Image: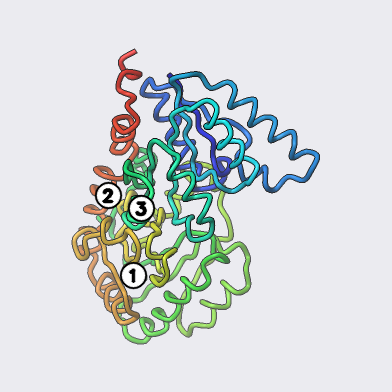
């Protein structure tokens, strides 16, 4: 039996990289045959005719390679109408087992396609409790499997809080800066007050500014804030991000919490910080209250006052940084690593027999 993955994007996209490419590698490593078919649906949408026809033909050819007893795994594959119609027609004729996986509340922007795939799929896998609540309106077989990471890679870059490092400590953020201007404003507003209030000096490192002047000016205009921008990284290299995170003393994830998209969204950055053993402060949104227990393995903040207070508390307490970092790393290893979630996936998909062969 083979699990056939059709993905949203190629491996350069974070969602597909963690949710499909990494999962396929882990399944094959454990003895379950899994393959990723090309092209990803996003590339079909971005390709002009007549070359688009070539990509559609490749999808059709891949579908006819699927045998009875195999499983089709649709990883957020709703980005192209032609792919969508092909899957509907194929399933009407051949009736294969289908898994539909989405890790963001894509129904906010693509309601009907998401609803139809959810109703059609034999198994629906989502990333957060908010997404599960929506999906259970249309399917009786919905499972929450959070986006996961290869813990062994991040563990190599575990933060060492025992080294004799004096302030200023480093507060760090990783992401695509231009796409998070509204979220970063939460942080900029907190820094303005923090710079005045705290007695503990700190610097801010923003990884992923992409030379965007809006990102630069947002923080350069803050009086007394020492800031460093890293414009880009080789994102697909497994060690590039954790290597940067290891340099942080505190990792931050500011995020708006209003609206269905934000309410039902999760954040991979939080897991990355915690997997490196870095003390983390995140906005109280989406799945964060399930990942972070406030004060035990990280801090959650809702208001600007909470952001300022919790950052100030961490900056003045090295032992607390180490405590939250250590507990956060344990949390990720036990619940959000591939070693934790792949056995769940094997069980949900009924792949135990494949493991025995």
| Image point (31%, 74%), residue name | 302
Q: Position of residue 72 (x, y in %)?
A: 48, 31
Q: Residues within 10 Å of mark 3 (few under 14, many from 20)?
A: few
Q: Give the Cα separation between the discs numbered 3 and 1.
A: 51 Å
Q: Which residue is mark 3?
A: 137
- Give the quadrant of the C terminus: top left
State the residue lying farthest toward the right: 50
| Image point (42%, 64%), residue name | 172
Say whether disc 3 or disc 1 marks the residue closer to the N-terminus: 3
- Mark 3 lies on a secondary structure that is loop
| Image point (36%, 23%), residue name | 30
Q: Residues within 10 Å of mark 1 (few under 14, many from 20)?
A: few
| Image: 182 above or below 28 | below
The number of discs equals: 3
Q: Position of residue 254 (x, y in %)?
A: 40, 69
| Image point (50%, 28%), residue name | 4
Return the residue nearer the eye: 260 or 255: 260
Q: Nearer the viewer, mark 2 or mark 3?
A: 3
Q: Nearer the viewer, mark 3 or mark 1?
A: 3
- Give the quadrant of the N terminus: top left
Question: Residue 167 shows which numbered tag?
Answer: 1
Return the residue nearer the eye: 114 or 40: 114
Q: Give the Cα separation between the discs numbered 2 and 3.
A: 34 Å
Q: Give the Cα separation between the discs numbered 1 and 2.
A: 23 Å
- Mark 2 lies on a secondary structure that is helix
């Amino acid at each position: 039996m083979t699990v056939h993955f059709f993905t949203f994007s190629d491996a350069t996209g974070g969602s597909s990289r963690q949710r499909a490419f990494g999962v396929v590698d882990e399944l094959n490593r454990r003895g379950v045959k899994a393959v990723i078919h090309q092209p990803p649906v996003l590339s079909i949408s971005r390709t002009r005719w007549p070359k688009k026809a070539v990509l559609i033909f490749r999808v059709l050819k891949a579908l006819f390679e699927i045998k009875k007893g195999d499983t089709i795994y649709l990883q957020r594959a709703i980005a192209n109408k032609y792919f969508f119609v092909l899957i509907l027609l194929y399933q009407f004729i051949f009736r294969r087992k289908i898994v539909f996986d989405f890790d963001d509340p894509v129904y906010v922007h693509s309601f009907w396609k998401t609803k139809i795939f959810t109703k059609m799929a034999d198994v629906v896998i989502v990333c957060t409790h908010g997404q599960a609540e929506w999906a259970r309106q249309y399917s009786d077989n919905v499972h929450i499997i959070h986006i996961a990471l290869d813990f062994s890679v991040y563990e190599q870059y575990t933060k060492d809080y025992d080294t004799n490092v004096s302030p200023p400590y480093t507060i760090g953020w990783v992401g695509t800066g231009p796409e998070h201007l509204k979220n970063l404003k939460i942080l900029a507003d907190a820094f303005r007050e923090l710079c005045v209030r705290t007695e503990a000096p700190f610097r801010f490192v923003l990884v992923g500014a992409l030379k965007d002047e809006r990102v630069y000016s947002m923080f350069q205009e803050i009086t007394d804030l020492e800031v460093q921008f890293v414009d880009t990284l080789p994102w697909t290299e497994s060690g590039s991000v954790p290597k940067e995170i290891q340099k942080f003393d505190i990792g931050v994830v500011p995020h708006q919490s209003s609206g269905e998209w934000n309410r039902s969204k999760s954040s991979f950055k939080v897991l990355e910080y915690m997997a490196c053993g870095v003390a983390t402060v995140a906005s109280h949104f989406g799945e964060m209250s399930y990942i972070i227990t406030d004060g035990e393995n990280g801090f959650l903040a809702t208001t600007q006052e909470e952001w300022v207070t919790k950052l100030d508390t961490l900056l003045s307490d090295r032992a607390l940084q180490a405590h939250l970092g250590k507990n956060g790393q344990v949390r990720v290893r036990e619940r959000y690593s591939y070693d934790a979630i792949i056995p769940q996936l094997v069980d949900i998909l009924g792949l135990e027999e494949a493991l025995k062969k």
